[in-house]
Image (cartoon, helix red, strand yellow):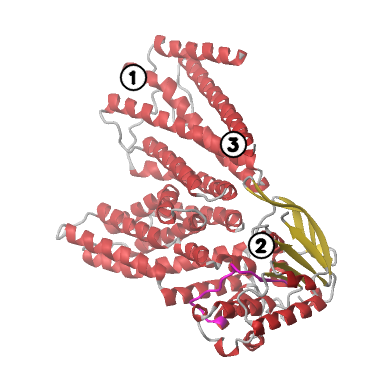
Amino acid sequence: MFWKMVFLIWMCAVIAAAFLLPAPQSQLGQVSRIFFFHVPVAWVAVLAFLLSFVFSIMYLRTRDSSYDAKASAASRLGLLFVIIATISGSIFAKSTWGSFWNWDPRETSIFILLLIYGAYFALRSAAESEERRAALSSAYAVMAFVAVPFLVFVVPRVYQSLHPTSSVVDVRFQMQMPPPILITFLASLLGFTFLFLWMFGLERRISIITARQKED
Amino acid sequence: MQTRTSTWATKSAWLLVKELKSEFRTRYALNAVLMFALTTLVVTSFSIGAFALTPRIASSLLWLVIFFSSMSGLAQVFIKEEEAGTANLLRLVAGPDTVFLGKLLFNLALLFMLELIVVPLFMVWMNVSVLDLWLFLSVLLLGSLGLVCATTIIAAIVSKARAKGSLFAVLSFPILLPLLIASIDGTRLSMEGEPLSAGWGDVRLLLSYLVVMFVASFLLFDSVWSE
Amino acid sequence: MAQLMGSMISLEAKDLGKRFGRRRVFEGIRFRLENKGSLVISGRNGSGKTTLLRVLCGLARPTEGRAIISHSGKELTPEQRRNLLGLVMPDLEFYGELTAMENLLFLSRVRGSNLTRETIRERIGWMGLKDRDDDLVFSFSSGMRQRLKYAFALLNDPRVLLLDEPAANLDQEGAALVHQVIDSQKAKGIVVIATNEQSDLRYADQNIHLGD
């Protein structure tokens, strides 16, 4: 309970700072404030993907179904965060460059992640038994994770990037941000990560209770 | 008493021979794949008519045909075993490594067979010329190898689930995307007359993709194949 | 493989259990067979006999416990298991588009054994299929397929023979052949039979009854 209160206050502070501080990118103006929300959400989506990869491997090694439950919980949340990241990015794109979708490398990559999650859940619903569902989707999650890094090399080659990179966050993660903005950004990142972990814990408890219910 | 003289290569070769024999007699997969490819080519050629395709469009079209034709036939190699009830027979006598290699080689043969027919037809019907043959062939070869390496395990996955046909394409597409993009790009360069050195980035990516996908599938295959 | 003949072979089940989702098929199965001997698994339809047999031969993974096949105390590798086991089961199917001879030749080679074609033909002949060995399996009746399954199971002189519904689809002559097979196998190795037939219990050194 205590942590929930802390989290609430924390995020309120983050949101307030996001709107009260001077806009991160002066050329883009007010709309660049989305940076405080869009980027952390996208990073958490990638974290979720990484977690489902790790849990899938653990399932394949131990055949312990709780790992499969964790992998699918991480994927479910990952899907949610990817959708939020895609929509927020799309809104940003519309107000900055005039169109909702441009197939630039970042947009394409996040779309692929969306496709992978979609495929993962399509596979899970097509499996005929719980054992198969777990084994097949774990194997797929690992294959997908292994294929994704190639996108990083391939996609930029084909399309021009419209994503602002150099002005606020340099591509090689050298933060070129004045301290108040940096602090707010990191605070937002932490906040969204905490949100993810909290939701993940809830998903776990729900699935344990549901499993126990079915046994009775 | 029989003695052990076979290596993994021999066993995989025997599986490949069986697959080729079966396929030659039933022609399930080859028919599906060829029909799809030819129909697509004919329709596209008709609708394009005399219009000259730019290399960018032509290379995309070629790989689209290859991709969708593969989707219509490359999963058969596992699906027909599960549906005919012979999969357990195979599990009884062959190890997962043998099965993976044998099936992969068969899919490769199938894909090459398809390309042997479709690629020349494509060149003729779409009025496309390839200015640098080495680059073109390298990309075609590596792209095909990568495609088969990545999709063999997915075919095995799909054979154990419902809704097999559409599921194969849904699962394969995100994983194949890097391969498709690099292949399309490399093929385009070869059509524009760029030498092998210009396409080196694509070739390098295709090579590393195929190695990584092969190793990953090889390691994961047993968990999918065994019950 | 020569060194594995005549040595101590054992099949052991340690607290074997199998569940499909929440449905428990069997649990706590314990037995040990050494060198020569037979086990008959009996029970009503749906009691899990076939599933237990699948677990024993490695076609299914147990949810609890282990099935161990070893020789001279050392557990067999999967490859050795593939060569020492023979299985006859209703839902095992051959490749219909290949002939009987092609089927068995392929199965033998992909397993790593180099039995000559003549030997394979001979063994197909033992099961009464001599005239049909070059016919496509697709044209075989269910009784003939069952006979071919025996020819396949016995191809490698298995030390462990697993039979599910041994006389399924067979005429009197076929059933008599099966009787011979089981007796001869009991003399040189292990037999595990899953069956509905009360009469099959006569083969049993040990018996496990599944279900109620």
Q: Is residue B93 left or right of residue B73?
A: right
Q: Which residues are magenta?
A: C85-100
Judged from the image, the secondary structure of the residue bearing numbered disc 3 is: helix
Q: Relative to residue B36, is residue A46 depicted above or below?
A: above
The residue wearing badge 2 is: C50
| Residue under the image location 54 percent in, 25 percent down | A193
Q: Pick the residue in front: A111 or A77.
A: A77
Q: Earlier in the sequence, mark 1 or mark 3?
A: 1
Residue B124 image label: none
Give the labeled residue for mark 1. A31
Residue C98 included in the magenta stretch of the image: yes
Q: Tell me whether the residue at label 3 lies in contact with that at label 2, contact meaning CB atoms closer than 8 angstroms.
A: no
The quarter of the rendered structure image containing the N terminus of chain B is: bottom right
Circle 1 sits in a helix, a strand or a loop, which is it? helix
Q: Position of residue C190 (x, y in %)?
A: 79, 71
The image quadrant of residue A67 is: top right
Query: Counting other residues with Cα less than 10 Å from the Cα at mark 2, is it few (<14), some (14-19), or many (20 or more)?
Result: many
Q: Is residue A159 above or below residue B156?
A: above
Residue C143 picture location, percent across and down: 58, 79
Q: Is residue B119 magenta?
A: no
Residue C11 seen in the figure: no
Q: Amino acid at mark 1?
A: Val
Is there CB contact under 8 Å for labels 1 and 3? Answer: no
| Chain ID, mark 2 | C
Disc 1 crowd rating (10 Å Cα; few below 14, some 14-19, many 20+) is some
